Image: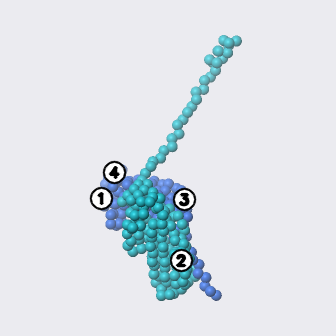
Amino acid sequence: MRAVLLLALLPFCNAVAHEMTPTYPTFMKSFMAGVSVTTLNLFNKRKDVSYYEIGVFTDEWEPVPFVSQYTIIPMKYLDTLSFDVYVSNLSLSSVEYICSVSQVQAGATVSSKICSRIK
Amino acid sequence: MKKLLMVCVLLAPHTPAYAEDTNISGSVQTRCLITTDTNGVFGNPLPSKLSTLAADGGVAPVVRYDVTLADAYLAKITTPTTFSSSPTLTDSVTWTGSTAVSKTSDAGMSVYETAKVTYGSTTQFDLTIAGSTWFSSEAAAVYGVSKSFSGGNYTAIVLAECIAK
């Protein structure tokens, strides 16, 4: 019997969109000594994605330690969420990018990543 | 009679009209939105090859970038280098891929294609003009040396990034 090869590469799904603002966030002093905080907003317009991972990076794309309400954010379709990112003042000068990356599940084949830049 | 009516009018309870303002607020911010425009499908022109090329029976996926501020973002699109899910493969898979501008909302965006930078499987575009840009990616996978892909579902991930400058 001839083997049936099912071709099911779907690099893109319908209506893949996600958005993170502001593009240029700024850090402010937080309620904790030695820690600064910034707030970002995430909008999920992807039916095929339910989680986004947050990361903070240097200009060389090295990870920077940070704390947030979520490292992986659960988001339903058309949800908007604000989240805080806390970074130690010792690491603050090395922070260059804050990124959100979609966590693709089985069936989804596009991963979208948006990075805001600290100015 | 008139006096009686006047008294009744003056004594009638006056109900003031209440009005309340309901605010609708929002803000306009610089933003980058990544949207899928066209689903991609692999064609199987040879038993050992999966390809999105139209000539191979595939469909090239298309991604749209919408930016609201000129010269504020870089678009990076990375074509697959591995399957995210597939049947068990016993040999190596050779991947090739490329990304190009397929459509733009501004004629000036034609420079994106000539100025793009490619490194490995990643193509980088400098989004110097605000508006919408469509990028089309091609990807092909060849199994071993003329080995046949076994039956089953094959899925690969394309990474579309929007990096603030």
Same-subunit check for callouts 4 and 1: yes
Return the residue found at the far right.
B1
**Colour of chain A in the image:** blue
Give me the disc on residue A93.
1
A84 or A14, which is in the foreground?
Answer: A14
Rendered image coloring scheme:
by chain
Q: Name the residue beneath numbered marker 2.
A: B55
- At label 1, the amino acid type is Ser
Same-subunit check for callouts 4 and 2: no
Spatial separation of the CA atoms under disc 2 and disc 1? 51 Å
Spatial separation of the CA atoms under disc 3 and disc 4? 33 Å
Q: Position of residue B40 (x, y in %)?
A: 53, 71
- At label 3, the amino acid type is Tyr
Return the residue found at the far front.
B107
Q: Residue at x 29, y 58 (%)?
A: A93
Q: Name the residue beneath numbered marker 3.
A: A77
Neighbour tally class for label 1: few under 14, some 14-19, many 20 plus, Cα within 10 Å:
few
Name above or below for residue B52 compared with residue B112.
below
Q: CB of mark 3 within 8 Å of CB of mark 4? A: no
Chain at tag 4? A
Chain at tag 1? A
Q: Name the residue beneath numbered marker 4.
A: A29
Callout 4: SS? strand
Identify the mark nearer the N-term, 4 or 1: 4
